[in-house]
Image (spheres, rainbow, N blue to C red):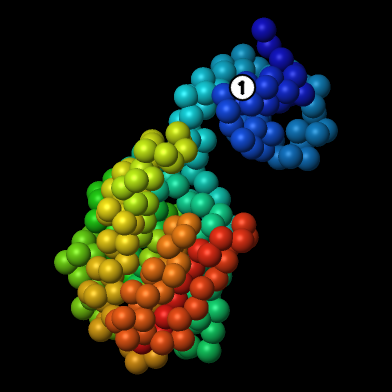
Amino acid sequence: MTQNIFEAYNHAKKELANAGIEDYGFEARQMIRRVTGFSNQQILERYNQPLTAFQQNNLTAMLKQRSIRYPLQYMFGEWGFYGRDFYVGVGALIPRPDTETLVEEALKALEGTENPAVLDLCAGTGCIGITLAAERKDATVTLVEKYPEAMGYLTRNIERNRTDNTRALAGDIFESAGADRTYDLIVSNPPYIPAEEMDTVSPEVHFEPQEALYGGEDGLLFFRAIVANYRDSLKPGGRMMFEVGIGEAQAVAEILSQAGSTEIAVQKDYGGVDRVVSGKF
């Protein structure tokens, strides 16, 4: 039976809530926007407009996919991050609001530095490095990504966001890819979930690439490798900055300290979690 927009929205909310989706109201709105092409304001103005059969079928298909906890972002094929849209899909880590804290701290660190050189390691979709390149058009940003699936999204996102001041580099951080240059800032949101937590993450996360999540037995494998392999690629006074998992901030700060870093700082995300750790070399 064909529903109007208001009925479809309420039906979607109920289905998503029954599937255990925490933010079911937000996701229902996103689905209605997607199938109608309307803005939030247009949805309010046309709430009694019937969906077409095509729109109804699309909504039904979305709800079925989401009921098995398939990520909404993969269904849409794109997602917003720091005011820009990025292509995303199977094989690439989904951009998250928590990571915007890393971008904000990186931009602060670059204040006063003209024509900064930035390295983004484990770049994935490129949301961090591309955002920095877009916000600081005088910067030169190198983005390193190992996996071809993610690299496909990264290169498309560079084109989409028209950041010509970027360099996409296929390579492995364990082989020091990108360390052939020197940088004012090195940023990374590396895999950081420890072994004991891999089975307890949310159902949606199981659809994301495990290689972008698993950080070794204690979750710190990539932090150790990046600090060891790239600290000599920082210009004097340059900074290294990481997104970290819950409860990892002090351990990552200690890794930086043992490597000779100074002015080590920890920044909380919007949820009050210690999320960004940085240090000067």
Q: Which of 17 and 146 is in front in this view?
A: 17
Q: Which of 223 and 10 is in front in this view?
A: 223
- In the picture, measured across the screen, residue 119 lies left or right of residue 22, that is left
Visible in this render: residue 197? yes
Vertical side of 60 occupied by 45: above or below: below
Vertical side of 166 occupied by 183: above or below: below
Q: Count of labels shown?
A: 1
Vertical side of 178 occupied by 204: above or below: above
Q: Residue 259 placed where, x, y %? A: 29, 81
Q: Which of 272 and 149 is in front in this view?
A: 272
Q: Residue 40 placed where, x, y %? A: 74, 39
- In the picture, measured across the screen, residue 49 lies left or right of residue 271, that is right
Q: What residue type is labelled 1?
A: Asn
- In the picture, measured across the screen, residue 134 lies left or right of residue 32, that is left
Identify the secondary structure beneath mark 1. helix
The residue wearing badge 1 is 18
